[in-house]
Image: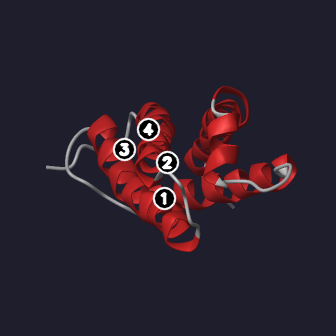
């Protein structure tokens, strides 16, 4: 059975990521993302939500099996930096490699900003949820 911290971490990821993703991509910057060719037709919000649920469970489980030096908040920050860079390469660079984007730099900057917010929020949540995690030297 999942540990309580895995479940809480997954819920925190879902509650932090889904609203940010929805508002960022489909409300504030929808026209820009359509111009980038990010979605050709109407995005499948349910499938996006399911993706975020799977990511949340996976990342929260993985976090419980990693150790970084520092306080709980520092450990969480280091973890989200590592996974955030991985997500950035598979999300931003891979998209730019597969699509002809008129303004590649603008897309990269916007998605980098989005991912920084997403993983910054997740890191804060992880640090709080795991605040009693042993401090590593």
Cβ–Cβ under 8 Å for marks 3 and 1:
no
Of the image marks 3 and 1, the number of the one nearer the N terminus: 3
Question: Is the residue marked by circle 2 packed among few (<14), some (14-19), or many (20+) residues within 10 Å?
Answer: many
How far apart in space, not on screen, are marks 1 and 4 (Cα)? 11 Å
**Snapshot quadrant of residue 57:** bottom right
Classify mark 2: helix, strand or loop: helix
Camera-side mark, 2 or 1: 2
| Residues tagged 2 and 1 counted as in contact (Cβ below 8 A) | yes
Residue underneath mark 3: 76
Q: Describe residue 137's horizontal placement relative to residue 43 as left or right.
A: left
Task: Kindly report the distance in space between the C-alpha atoms of the residues bearing marks 2 and 4.
Answer: 10 Å
- Which comes sooner in the sequence, label 2 or label 4? 2
Which residue was labeled with disc 2?
Answer: 107
- Give the mark nearest the N terminus, 2 or 1: 1
Image position of 53 with respect to 99: above or below: above
Find numbered disc 1 in the image and state the secondary structure of the residue it sits on.
Answer: helix
Residues 67 and 108: in front is 108
Q: Which residue is mark 1?
A: 92
Placement of 54 over or under 24, stated as above or below: below
Residue hosting label 4 = 113
Work out whether residue 2 can be spotted: no
At 46% from the left and 34% from the top, the residue drawn is: 117
Closer to the camera: disc 3 or disc 1? Answer: 1
Q: Give whichever of discs 2 and 3 has the lower sequence position.
A: 3
In the shown orientation, is residue 101 left or right of residue 116?
right
Label 4 or label 3, whichever comes before in sequence order: 3
């Amino acid at each position: 059975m999942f540990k309580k911290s895995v479940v809480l971490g997954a819920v925190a990821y879902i509650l932090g990521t889904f609203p940010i993703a929805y508002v960022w991509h489909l409300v504030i910057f929808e026209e820009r993302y359509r111009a980038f060719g990010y979605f050709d037709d109407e995005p499948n919000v349910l499938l996006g939500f399911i993706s975020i649920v799977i990511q949340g469970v996976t990342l929260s489980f993985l976090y419980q099996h990693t150790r970084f030096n520092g306080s709980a908040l520092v450990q969480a920050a280091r973890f989200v930096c590592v996974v955030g860079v991985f997500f950035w390469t598979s999300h931003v660079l891979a998209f730019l490699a597969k699509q002809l984007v008129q303004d590649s730099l603008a897309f990269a900057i916007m998605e980098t900003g989005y991912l920084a917010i997403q993983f910054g929020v997740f890191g804060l949540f992880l640090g709080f949820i795991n605040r009693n995690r042993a401090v590593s030297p």
